[in-house]
Amino acid sequence: MPTCDGPATVVFDPSLTEYDFGPAHPMSPVRVDLTMRLADELGVLGGRLKRVDAPIASDDLIATIHDPGLIEAVIKAGTTGSGYYDRRGLGTDDNPVFPGMHQAAAHIVGASVEAFRQVWSGESLHAVNITGGLHHAMRDRASGFCIYNDVAIGIQHLLDQGAQRVAYVDVDVHHGDGVERIFWDDPRVLTISLHETGQMLFPGTGFPRDLGGPEALGTAVNVALPPGTGDGGWLRAFHAVVPPLLREFRPEILVTQHGCDSHVEDPLAHLMLSVDGQRAAYLALHDLAHEVCDGRWVATGGGGYALVEVVPRAWTHLLAIVGGRPLETDTDTPEGWRDHVRTTLGRVAPHRMTDGRTPAYRDWSEGYDPDTWLDRAIHATRLETFPLHGLDPLP
């Protein structure tokens, strides 16, 4: 199993779990707590994966991306603890108002920007913020459980520090619409999103013909996958699209979003990946970072709503890969961790770090079948985007 000896950082402190929409909301911060507990008990934290505290982003930093009116609305809503601000996406079922909302969201932004700073400065080769990846937030409004777009703010920070080519790969089951839209007209930022088709799933966007603005045509790339896609189909799509584009674009740094709601047990979507397939994607992105940008890699979390069954295992695998020491798939989950889940949540936790799958896929170079929805989706993306990068779209 490959290892990586570069310095690596996880940006985290327990108060990041204060980003909490309430007990009835799907995105419970318990998923973060369980992940960090599992990673700690498995020995993933410490050693090569250094933990650093997360600063709270200033309003000025948030305003490098977000409209001041949104920031003002979030502050006001979080101060009163109530209110309906439909024009700003607040007070909805997706984004209910809670006390201290601005500070909690600014804390996640600060954590992500610190991860970006770590890598761009050279202090770390890889850095991760599992509480980040809030990719739906738009410049002027919250959306889809996301108040501020920490990823976009981090990418803007890189551009402000002189970066000329940043690649963003989003493997969340939902289209990474906020990051894409914010950099729609910026040729310095390549956004690639692999997601369940918007025909079936929020936010209803992210189709192959969504290519970026006139001055940045081809820098938005979307793979709209059919519901029911499993490990083999997902990895087939990933390898048919992502590596060729990254190799051609030659980013100075790779940014990735790792929503694990593509799992078959996730309650909010319809893909059928296993933890093993997700782990294979993380390994592939790690290897691509080393191949195309000398290992400079910033990873974030994202969606994921199977709070016990999936998220802690998937993200612990991610943390281990960021730290340069991937976990074997047949690793047992620690008894102490399972006991904690049982006593605090009354739930039965998984006993192993695997779903028992061996991810395999048929490479696109072997040809495609136009009678299958999956292959039509991959082919459509390649036809639209590859010629804009001087690449042959055919196998």
Image (tube, helix red, strand yellow):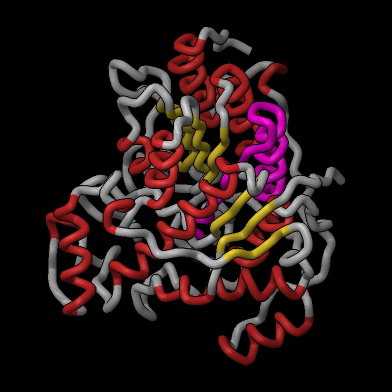
Tell me the residue at 47%/36% (across/down).
Answer: 193
Q: Nearer the viewer, residue 252 or 255?
A: 252
Regarding residue 45, the answer to whether it shows in the image is: yes
Residue at horizontal 57%, vertical 75%? 33
Residue that protrudes farthest toward the right in the picture: 1
Horizontally, is 205 left or right of 162 in the view?
A: left
Q: Residue at x 56, y 10 (%)?
A: 391
Asked if residue 289 is among those painted magenta in the image, a careful observer would answer yes
How many numbered tags mark residues here?
A: 0
* Residue 225 visible to the viewer: no
Image quadrant in which you'd find residue 74: bottom left
Question: Which stretch appears magenta?
Answer: 277-305
Residue 83 shown left or right of residue 357 in the figure: left
Left or right for 89, reference 153: left
Residue nearer the viewer, 216 or 209: 216
Res 181 quadrant in image? top left
Q: Is residue 387 above or below residue 206?
A: above
Placement of 166 over or under 52, stated as above or below: above
Please tell me which residue lies in front, 154 or 19: 154
